[in-house]
Amino acid sequence: MSIHIGAEPGQIAETVLLPGDPMRAQWAAETFLTDPVCINRIRGMLGFTGTWRGHRVTIHGSGMGMPSLSIYANELIRDFGARTLIRIGSAGSMQPHVGLRDIVLAMTASTLSTPSRGIFRDLNFAPCADFGLLSAAHAAATDRGIAAHVGGIYSSDVFYDERPDLNEQMTRHGVLAVEMEAAELYILAARHGVRALAVLTVSDHLLTGAALPPADRESSFGDMVEIALEAAFA
């Protein structure tokens, strides 16, 4: 047990999928895992451990934003021995060719600020995904005939952004999508010598204003979960 995770020793697998929403963690565990067991309910942040094709997997909510994810990722790695952490979540497209329901595999994650910023001081550290996970995820998506885009994303520390000038420059420089957690996850993975990847489903489009209706979001996220699981155990 740690401060924010109530699991007992041995209840959390070495492979952890991290959706932001705890209810999405429950949905993914009940949909994709065999015999999932709830191993955390502290502060309503649900976590479940079960098996997928015989492999032990934990699916645990990480909350919204990098400060929240940093808490859970730190404890999962340091206190429970997690070695592979894959963020599964939604993202907003920043490119015309990246459409709703497409998958984005984040090779790098740019950001203005993370909870780890103070460690690096004047260095602009460039957090990136584990190449083995990234390559396996791309292969899994290709095998399924799913549109998957590999490249840089932007991890924002605000949801209600008021920097259209910055968004324009990111679009100009090829940033594929925006979300709120991956940069800190990649930094923590580098620090602790573990593997990390963000597999994202495009739910909104910043250029067109298009968005998936709430009822369609969960049904569109299944590909993302399956790609993450296949990548973890490739």
Image (spheres, rainbow, N blue to C red):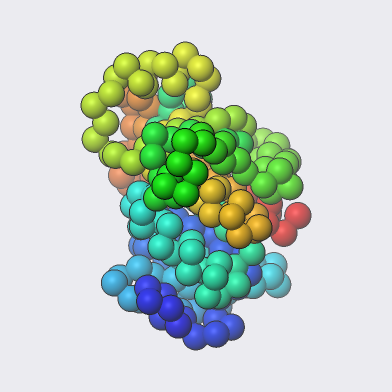
**On the image, which quarter does residue 21 sit in?**
bottom left
Residue 43 is left or right of residue 117, and the answer is: left
Residue 178 visible in the shown view? yes
Residue 14: give x, y in percent of width and height. 63, 69
Residue at 51%, 51% (x, y): give it: 185
Q: Nearer the viewer, residue 139 or 170?
A: 170
How far from the left and from the top, in percent, is residue 22? Answer: 37, 63
Residue 203 locus on image (x, y percent): 40, 37
- Decide: is 204 above or below 27: above
Camera-side residue of 143 and 148: 148
Please identify the quarter of the rendering in which residue 125 is found: top right
156 relative position to 143: left or right: left
Task: Decide if residue 208 is in sight here.
Answer: no
Q: Position of residue 201 (x, y in %)?
A: 48, 40
Residue drawn at (33%, 76%) of the image:
42
Task: Please report the residue visible at 43 percent of the width from the left and 44 percent of the height from the top.
Answer: 117
In the picture, the quarter occupied by the C terminus is bottom right
Above or below, 99 relative to 126: above
For the N terminus, the image quarter is bottom left
Q: Residue at x 55, y 30 (%)?
A: 152
